[in-house]
Image (cartoon, helix red, strand yellow):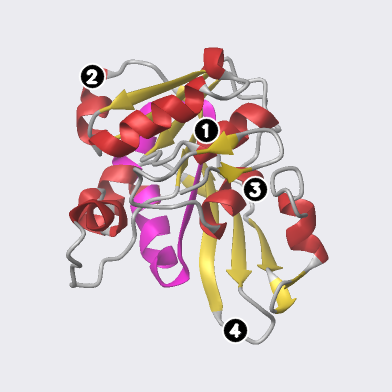
Amino acid sequence: MKPFKFKQFSVNQDRCAMKIGTDGVLLGAWASVAHDPFSVLDIGSGTGVLSLMLAQRSHAETIEALEIDADAYEQCAENFENSPWADRLFCYHASLLEFVEEIDDKYDLIICNPPFYSENYKTANDARDLARFNDAMPFEHLNYAAGNLLSNTGLFCVIIPYKEEAEFIKLASKNGLQLNRLLHVKGNPETEVKRSLLEFSFEETKTEASELIIETARHQYTEAYINLTKDFYLKM
C-alpha cells in the first residue's frame, strides 16, 4: 500500500486498522490553534495524521500522541520520524486510562477522532474492531481524560456521529467541559447531518454553531470544504 501523500507530509498506513479518511482530516483542519497551544495531545492517534496536521498548522513545542495498538503505535512513530517536524512529535504506547493516571502534564489542545461503532457486531479483523469500537475507548473515558489533562485555558476537540452528540455534550459537562463551538457535517445538501465536530473548554461561552456540506455532487466539492482542507490535500 502506497503512503497517503499530503502537501507537506506523507503517511504510511498499511499497519493501521483505521485508514486516513475525511473525518480525521476535517478535525485536523477545523480544530482551533488560535490560542497558540504550547502542548498538544492526540488521543488514539492511529497513523498520527492529526498530530502531523497540527504540527503543520501550529507552533506547538510538544505534540504527543497516544496509541494502544502496537502496530499502529509503531507506524505512528515512524510517520513522525519521517516528517519535517520529528523533533516536536512523540508517540506513547499506552491505554488512555493508564496515561491519565501517570501523566501530570496539562495540554493546551486535546484532539481525538475516537472509535465510534457502538453497534453490537464484530468483524473477523480484531485490530480494525479495536480501532472502530467504542468499547476500546468509551466516551466516558475520553471525557474523563480531557477533564483531567486539559489546561485551564485549553481546548478539547473531537469528531463523533451526530446521533451521539447530545450524550457526548452531557458527559463533557459532567467533567466541567463546556461546548464552545460545533460544526455539523453533511455529505451533500440532501443528506442528513452525519458528523458533529465539537470544541470544549472550561470557560462558558455562547456556543458558535455552523454547518459544512462536503460536496454538491460526486467529487464536486463545496468552496467551504476546499477552503478548510486545501492546505493538506494535494488535489485541492
The numbered disc on residue 61 is none
- Sequence-wise, the earlier of marks 2 and 4 is 2
Pick whichever, 7 or 110, lies toward us: 7
Q: Disc 1 on helix, strand or loop?
A: helix
* Residue at the (69%, 78%) spot, across then down: 218
Element carrying mark 3: helix
- Can you identify the residue that label 2 sits on? 102
**Label at residue 30:** 3
Q: Residue at x 73, y 61 (%)?
A: 225
Which callout, 1 or 4, points at the residue further toward the start of the chain?
Answer: 1
Q: Nearer the viewer, mark 1 or mark 4?
A: 1
- Cα separation, mark 4 vs mark 3, equals 21 Å
Label 3 CA crowd tier, 10 Å (few <14, some 14–19, many 20+): some
Horizontal relation, residue 225 to residue 118: left or right: right
The quarter of the displayed image where residue 102 is located? top left
* Range of magenta residues: 143-172
Asked if residue 156 is among those painted magenta in the image, a careful observer would answer: yes
Mark 3 and mark 1: Cα distance apart in space: 13 Å
User: Which residue lies under the disc numbered 1?
Assistant: 51
The amino acid at mark 2 is: Glu
Q: Residue 25 location, x and y as percent? A: 59, 50
